[in-house]
Amino acid sequence: ITIIFVEQSRDRVKVSWRSRGDHDVSQIAYRFGGGGHKPAAGAEISGKLEDVKEMIITETYKLL
């Protein structure tokens, strides 16, 4: 799984997930108000970049 973080503003982060294999990354995106498909998903999340990164990485590890 690859995760890309793009800081849109000081309190808004765009997150994109990509997966090759059996992991359905859309499950994670839906938890944060986003969407997508099994191999590719995204969401825009309110919060500071470092806080969002920590939260997203933690939730992504739970999928593994």
Image (cartoon, rainbow, N blue to C red):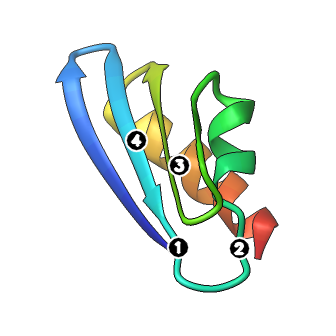
Residue 3 higher or lower than 23, as above or below: above
Mark 3 vs 1, N-terminal side: 1
Label 1: few (<14), some or many (≥20) within 10 Å? Answer: some
Label 2: few (<14), some or many (≥20) within 10 Å? Answer: some
Q: Which residue is mark 4?
A: 15
Q: Nearer the viewer, mark 3 or mark 1?
A: 1
- Under circle 1, the secondary element is loop
Label 1 near label 2: C-beta < 8 Å? yes
What kind of residue is marked 4? Answer: Val
The percent position of residue 6, horizontal first and vertical second, equals 23, 39
Q: Nearer the viewer, residue 49 or 15?
A: 15
Label 3: few (<14), some or many (≥20) within 10 Å? Answer: few
What kind of residue is marked 3? Answer: Glu
Q: Which mark is residue 23?
A: 2
Q: Which mark is residue 35?
A: none
The percent position of residue 25, horizontal first and vertical second, equals 64, 58
Q: Which mark is residue 54?
A: 3
Residue located at (43% from left, 24% from top): 44
Label 1 near label 4: C-beta < 8 Å? no
- Under circle 2, the secondary element is loop
The percent position of residue 3, horizontal first and vertical second, equals 41, 61
Q: Nearer the viewer, mark 4 or mark 1?
A: 1
Residue 15 higher or lower than 58, as above or below: above
Residue located at (58% from left, 28% from top): 34
Q: Which residue is mark 1?
A: 19
Mark 3 vs 4, N-terminal side: 4
On screen, residue 45 versus residue 22, left or right, reads left
Residue located at (70% from left, 33% from top): 30
Residue 64 higher or lower than 50, as above or below: below
